[in-house]
Amino acid sequence: MPLLFTGSLGIDTVETPTGKRDDVIGGSAVYFAYAASFFTPVRLVGAVGDDCPKPMLDVFKGRDIDTAGLEVRQGSKTFRWHGSYVKDLNEAVTVEVDLNVLAERAPKIPDAFLDSRYVFLANTHPALQQQMLGNLKAAKLVVADTMNLWITTERAELVKLLGKIHGLVLNDGEARLLTEKKNLIAAARDVLKMGPKFVVIKKGEHGSMLVSDKDVFVLPAYPADVVVDPTGAGDSFAGGMMGYLATQGTFSPATIKRAMAFGTVVASHTIADFSLGGLQAIDREAIDDRWHQFKQAMSF
């Protein structure tokens, strides 16, 4: 089934211990859509400015990604981010950021997308996330992402959103900030009280955690021996996870666990090169092969 995704598209400059890349394609929508398209058709909703080089958007060609919801806004500028991982590969330092088109109105969801049953609302203002969700009457599974900025400045709107979604994906620091609980299991259970049926907490190199009303599941990261650029790893994880979930008829804890493993494997390919290079170098067979290796490594 098609998976609708809303998120950012941008132009990145990235520095890591292995080198620097200027003006490469980035943004949550790019990594998520590319990762999810290994599993299911993707409907992309987002916006760029008229300064976005056309060759950058050509990365979607040949992928099962419907870009009818991608707006190229005349007179606007594309989101730009300059980040550095030189000091710590686990945490990006933002050198410079220009929100540009992301500070404007939310992109319009095409009429042909309104029947989407599987939806991921990427990190943006929670009021805009609610606005988009309000247009999707047929949604069967809605998962959202957020960040510390909205937790701190728009908590009331974020809490409203949590009452309308099935799942929330966030990192460990955000979970602690949202709930004021240091223990991640206790933090996740507090989030469940706000509305979601399940919470997935990303822990960087330490993997991820699933908490639902039924159980707690902890998954390590894939033991990658090549880490070039961590940018987009979290978005690729979410894309792989949601892409797999959109192909399933059930969202039981067992299904979500398998989906998280697929997301973990996809992210392990993302970090092997700058920008989309790691994902562009693989196919679904490579993902499945690594998934089976990962599953075997987790057996004892």
Image (cartoon, rainbow, N blue to C red):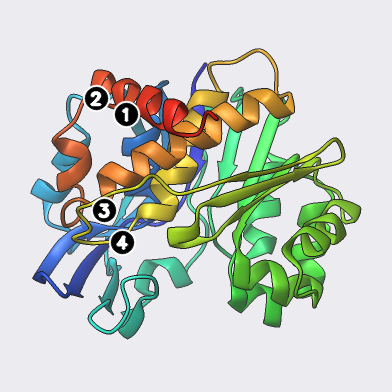
In the depicted view, which residue is nearer to us: 58 or 278?
A: 278
Q: Secondary structure at mark 1?
A: helix
Q: Residues within 10 Å of mark 2 (few under 14, many from 20)?
A: few
Observer-side mark, 1 or 4, equals 1
Furthest residue toward front: 300
Q: Secondary structure at mark 4?
A: loop
Q: Residues within 10 Å of mark 4 (few under 14, many from 20)?
A: many
The image shows residue 295 at horizontal and vertical percentages of 46, 27
Residue 290 tag number: 1
Callout 3 touching callout 4 (CB < 8 Å): no
Going by the numbered disc 1, the residue's amino acid type is: Arg
157 relative to 48 in the view: left or right = right
Whether 193 is drawn above or below 61: the answer is: below
- Secondary structure beneath dot 2 equals helix
Tag 2–tag 4 contact (CB < 8 Å): no
Which of the labelled discs sits on residue 271, or is there none?
3
Amino acid type at circle 2 is Ala
The residue that appears at 66% across and 12% down in the rendered structure is: 249
Label number found at residue 231: 4
* C-alpha span from label 2 to label 4: 21 Å
